[in-house]
């Protein structure tokens, strides 16, 4: 088994584990049971869908002559599902607000540092 196959197997195992835990949790919440075969089928479907999503996202970025997948690519991918599209739009807006707040905070801290440095430099030249 080469390195790529081993990596793919580790990813599949991680997806299977996560899907199994989600299925067990959901089944417990609904007071139902779910067979191992059903969980395995959901995990395999999830993995295959993620592969398709990855290929589509790469194609969108390539079409735009970029090497990086952006939020706009993800929004484009989700356009077929109204619920998913709405969720991604909401998360995108939340991220934009958080990024703006971080930029403002960094700018404020940088201004404070410059002010302190200038005050320190003025004190040195007076002595």
Image (cartoon, grey):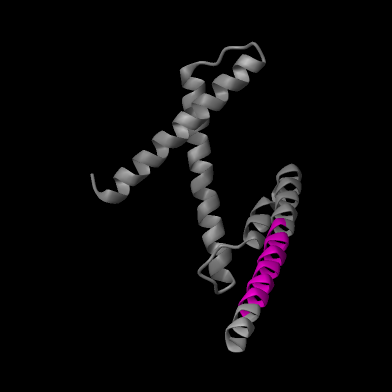
Q: Decide whether residue 36 is among the magenta residues.
A: no
| Magenta region | 98-117
Query: Residue 105 at x, y = what percent?
Result: 70, 63
The relative height of residue 32 versus residue 16 in the rendered view (above or below) is above
Tell me what residue is drawn at x 52 percent, y 49 percent.
52
Q: Decide which of 55, 121 is in the foreground and name it.
A: 121
Q: Residue at x 76, y 48 (%)?
A: 86
For this view, does 30 lie left or right of residue 4? Answer: right
Q: Nearer the viewer, residue 51 or 125?
A: 125
Residue 102 within the magenta-colored segment of the rendering: yes
37 versus 88 height, above or below? above
Question: Percent position (x, y) of residue 70?
Answer: 60, 63
The residue drawn where x is 52% and y is 45% is: 50
Quarter of the rendering containing residue 101: bottom right
Q: In the figure, residue 126 lies in which quadrant? A: bottom right
> The N terminus lies in which quarter of the figure?
top left
- Left or right position of 125 against 104: left
Quadrant including the C terminus: bottom right
């Amino acid at each position: 088994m080469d390195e790529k196959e081993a990596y793919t197997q580790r990813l599949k195992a991680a997806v299977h584990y996560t899907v199994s835990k989600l299925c067990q949790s959901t089944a417990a919440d609904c007071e139902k049971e779910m067979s191992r075969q059903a969980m395995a089928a959901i995990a395999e479907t999830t993995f295959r869908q993620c592969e398709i999503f990855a290929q589509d996202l790469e194609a969108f970025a390539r079409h735009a002559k970029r090497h990086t997948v952006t939020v706009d690519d993800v929004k484009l991918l989700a356009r077929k599902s109204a619920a998913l599209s709405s969720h991604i739009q909401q998360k995108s807006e939340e991220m934009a607000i958080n990024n703006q707040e971080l930029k403002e905070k960094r700018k404020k801290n940088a201004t404070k540092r410059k002010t302190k440095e200038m005050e320190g430099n003025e004190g040195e030249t007076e002595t």
